[in-house]
């Protein structure tokens, strides 16, 4: 990372959805919709975290389901 940029991982929030959708659009041929991402935020079995860099905001995320 450049300079003194600080990175952190935290639970995703509704206000992160626009950045998460932009990452999906840039990363996948068949990206998940904003509705799908928003639905996962509300699921008790879903784990959704974002990677943030102080000056740039959200630069990545993980969305997985806990099944067992």
Image (cartoon, grey):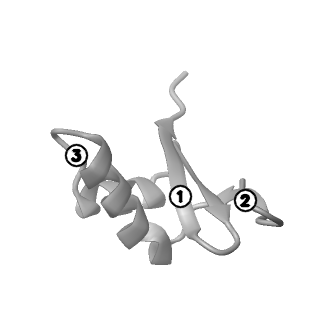
Query: As displayed, is residue 14 above or below residue 32?
Result: below
Q: Position of residue 50 (x, y in %)?
A: 58, 56
Q: Position of residue 2 (x, y in %)?
A: 72, 59
Query: As displayed, is residue 5 above or below residue 24?
Result: below
The reply to whether residue 15 is visible in this rendering is yes
CB within 8 Å, label 2 to label 1: no
Q: Position of residue 7 (x, y in %)?
A: 74, 58
Looking at the image, residue 65 sits to the left or right of residue 9; the answer is left
Looking at this view, is 24 or 37 the one in front?
24
Secondary-structure class at tag 3: loop
Please tell me the numbered disc located at residue 59.
Answer: 1
Looking at the image, residue 33 sits to the left or right of residue 52; the answer is left
Q: Which sits earlier in the primary sequence, circle 2 or circle 1?
A: 2
| Residue drawn where x is 83% and y is 66% of the image | 4
Query: As displayed, is residue 20 above or below residue 26?
Result: below
CB within 8 Å, label 1 to label 3: no
Pointer 2: what residue? Answer: 2
| Residue drawn where x is 52% and y is 42% of the image | 45
Pointer 3: what residue? Answer: 31
| Residue drawn where x is 41% and y is 67% of the image | 19
Q: Quadrant of the C terminus?
A: top right
Nearer the camera: disc 2 or disc 1: 2
Looking at this view, is 26 or 46 the one in front?
26
Disc 3 packing (10 Å; few <14; some 14–19; many ≥20) = some
| Gap in angstroms between the C-alphas marked 2 and 3 | 29 Å
């Amino acid at each position: 990372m450049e300079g003194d940029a600080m990175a952190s991982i935290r639970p995703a929030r509704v206000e992160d959805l626009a950045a998460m959708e932009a990452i999906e659009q840039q990363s996948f041929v068949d990206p998940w919709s904003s509705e799908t991402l928003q639905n996962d935020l509300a699921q008790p079995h879903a784990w959704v975290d974002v990677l943030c860099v102080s000056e740039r905001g959200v630069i990545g995320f993980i969305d997985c389901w806990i099944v067992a």
